[in-house]
Structure formats: structure tokens, C-alpha cells
Amino acid sequence: MNFEALYSPAARRLRPSIIRALLSLVREPGVISLAGGTPDSNLFDLERYAEIAGRVTREEGRLALQYGETQGLPALREQVSLYLEGRGVKIPPEQVLITNGSQQGIDLLCRLFLGPGDALAMEEPGYLGAINGFRNLGAEIIPLKLRDEEGLDPAQVEECLGAWKGPRPKLLYLTPTFQNPTGACLGPARRAALAELAARHSLLLVEDDPYGEISFDGPPPSPVTAIDRSGHCLFLGSFSKMSVPGLRLGWAAGPADVIRSLTLAKESTDICTSVLGQAIGAEFLKGGHLRATLPSLVAAYRKRRDVLHAALLRHLPKGSRLTRAGGGFFLWAELPERLNTLDLFKAAVAAKVAYVPGAPFYSTEGAGLHSMRLSFCAVEEPKLEEGARRLGEVLKQAGAAVAAPGTHPDLTECPA
């Protein structure tokens, strides 16, 4: 029987992640993967987590191994509230929802606000997990093109919203701090202007911030939510990138009515996030271990950023342009336009190096075909240099040695 004939309209819109499909090719022995966005497991504080997990199980096992509140363990919501306060975001524990990573927060927002024909605005290129979530529900995406390494230009956003002829957008989805995939980071004036713009247009500004604390060139910038005075911001966060992803701990924090409704939506999906994981996470935060481990983690990633950036400047073909992200996990390269990074992916894997083609990060059909995302977070420094060399050879063999202008004015041009 063909059960697909029984699927709902939403189920028929489901599409596999092209990144997941491509990364299945990367598992071959000897491939240097500049593709994945996973943290380096060698940097995990394993002994600390083992000690906390044992203690929580012994002392709080009857609570931690039981079902819990859908909104989240009170002790963890309190710690998240304190953590946010340290970043200038004053949101009480009652307005915090614990999620299975920030991806669940995006999914719950989709369920709450979006249906077929609804509209939202987001950066382009932007986070693929969000693009897929919005598309799967049949929502229309208004692409807001990134033009420099300070992220969105508020005047351009105003222009795009004014020119939009479709349904009034409900959400403005941003990853303003060390964005995935480009590494762009909104400047302070743009943060304030976008917060004001969201209020004026009656939009919910969704600030997705998985990388905010992984800042290489100075203190992390204040979140947009810390600047907002109108109550139009919802803050999504996660401990996956700055600690460990295996506990699947994220959060949504913002307006009380939105958090209540998101909690109802979560209740019908998974009842609650793992209470054991929440209890471990709460103890890790309460003990100050996140603050203690972040400096060494950031230092390791900063060094890898520098190594990969320098190597790519040497090895990418003439006419390429490259970001130098101030934080996060990724560099973004734009190649001469004759190069299609989707077409070249298999050749790169055959040469034992991998990247993520740029096209999946665009909601605009046919865009981003000559761009790529490159990750430095989980690769040792000598392999970063070798990976850049292999990639350069693949691109040059594909005929990339001719000069061609990039399209991103503030990217660094590669000399050769």
C-alpha cells in the first residue's frame, strides 16, 4: 500500500535536509570535514559531568528519573534566568521554557504562529534548520539579504517589508550574533534599530542565539532582547555549542503569554524535556562550571578560526571572498561565480575534504550556488591547513584560477 496517499498536506511538504544527505558522504576514512557544525567532544568537561550525573542520580534520582513539568525543571529555569541576567536580559524563571535544544523552540514557534500562506522575514543566507521548519508548514519567507559582516541593514529591512505584497509578516527571525552560516554579527546601532522596527511593525522578533558566548575578538555583544523595551522579543538559546549538545538543553524566554502558549504546544509533542538532563544542567550552571570552562573553549576555537582563515586566504582561488567571523563556528566563502559548490561537492569528498554548499542556506531559488560554509570547530589545526590545501586544489582544477568579483562588499578577497 502507498501510505503517502494518506499523508497530511504538511507531511507532504517535508523534505530531507540536503546537508544531512551530503554529510553521509563525509564518513569515508581520511576525509577532513570542514562541514559539520558540531562542537569538539575533546573539549567536553567529562569528569565534571560524570561527577554531577552520579551525584544527581544518587541524591535526587526519584525526582530526576521521573516525569517533570512541561515548562521545565524549576531549578534549571532559575539558572537560565540568572544566566540571561548576566548577559543583560532580565526575564524571570516564570517566563522561561526549557526545550530540547533551540531547534525545538523554532519548531514550537512554527506550530504557534505559522500555517500555509503565513509570512515571516529572516536573513538570507540563514539557518537551514529554520528555513526547513518554516517551509514545512507552508509559510512564505521574506528574504532579507546580508550585505556585510555587521548583519542586516535596518533600512534595507524596512525597504523589504514595505515592498512585500503578500500577507503581513508575523515574525522577524534573526541569528544576530555570529550567524550560521556567515558568522555575521549585528552592530549595536543595528540591534537597537531592529528592536524598534519590530515594535513598530508589530512583529515578534525571534532572536536565536546559540553562538553568542563564543566570541573571539572581545566580550560578547548584548543580545537584541537586552535592548528591547517594548516586549516584542523572544530569546532562543542553547547550551549545545558552549557546553555539550548531548543533554539537549535549550530554552525560549520572552513574553509571558507566548511562553504559556509554547508550553501548551510542547505538552502535546514530548510532555517534558529529560528531567535527568535538566537536573545535570542546573547543577553544572549553579556550580559556576559553564563560566569556568568557556574561556578555554573559546581560546581553542579562536586559534582554529585563525588557522583556517589564514590557510583559506592562501589556498582559495583568485577572486574568492572570505569572512573572518568574530565568533561562532563558521567561515563563509564566496567563489568566482562560474563555480557551483553543489556540483563540486563529490569531487571535494573524493579529494578527502568536505564543506557545506551555500545554496541550502537560501530561501531564494537558485541563489548561493557559488558559496560555501566552512567549519573549524571540531578539526585539529594541522588538519585545517591540509583541508584548505585540498579544497584549493579541487577548486583550481575545476577552472577557478580566473579572476571574478565576489558579491559581498566586506568579505576579504583572497590574493591567489
Image: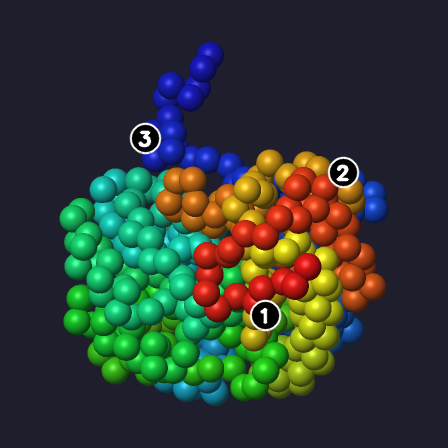
According to the picture, the residue beneath numbered tag 3 turns out to be 9
CA–CA distance in space, label 1 to label 3: 42 Å
Identify the amino acid type marked 2.
Answer: Ala
Tell me the residue that label 1 is attached to.
324
335 left or right of 49 in image: left
Residue type (three-letter) at the residue carrying disc 1: Arg
Q: Foreground: 133 or 360?
A: 360
Residue drawn at 79 percent across, 66 percent down: 381
- Dot 3 amino acid type: Pro
Please report the residue visible at 78 percent of the width from the left and 42 percent of the height from the top. Answer: 351
Q: Can residue 411 be spotted in the picture?
A: yes
Side of 3 relative to 294 (left or right): left
- Residue 236 tag number: none
Q: Residues within 10 Å of mark 2 (few under 14, many from 20)?
A: some
Alpha carbons under labels 3 and 2: distance apart: 39 Å
Q: Residue at x 33, y 42 (%)?
A: 137
Callout 3: helix, strand or loop?
helix
* Vertical relation: 119 (above or below) 287: above
Residue of label 2:
350
Secondary structure type for disc 2 = helix
Front residue of 333 and 376: 333
Q: Quadrant of residue 252?
A: bottom left
Foreground: 237 or 311? Answer: 311
Q: Earlier in the sequence, mark 1 or mark 3?
A: 3
Q: Residue 325 location in percent, x, y?
A: 57, 70
**Percent of width and height locating residue 151:** 41, 68
Where's residue 176, x and y in %? 42, 70
Could you tell me if the residues under marks 1 and 2 are in contact, i.e. CB atoms within 8 Å?
A: no
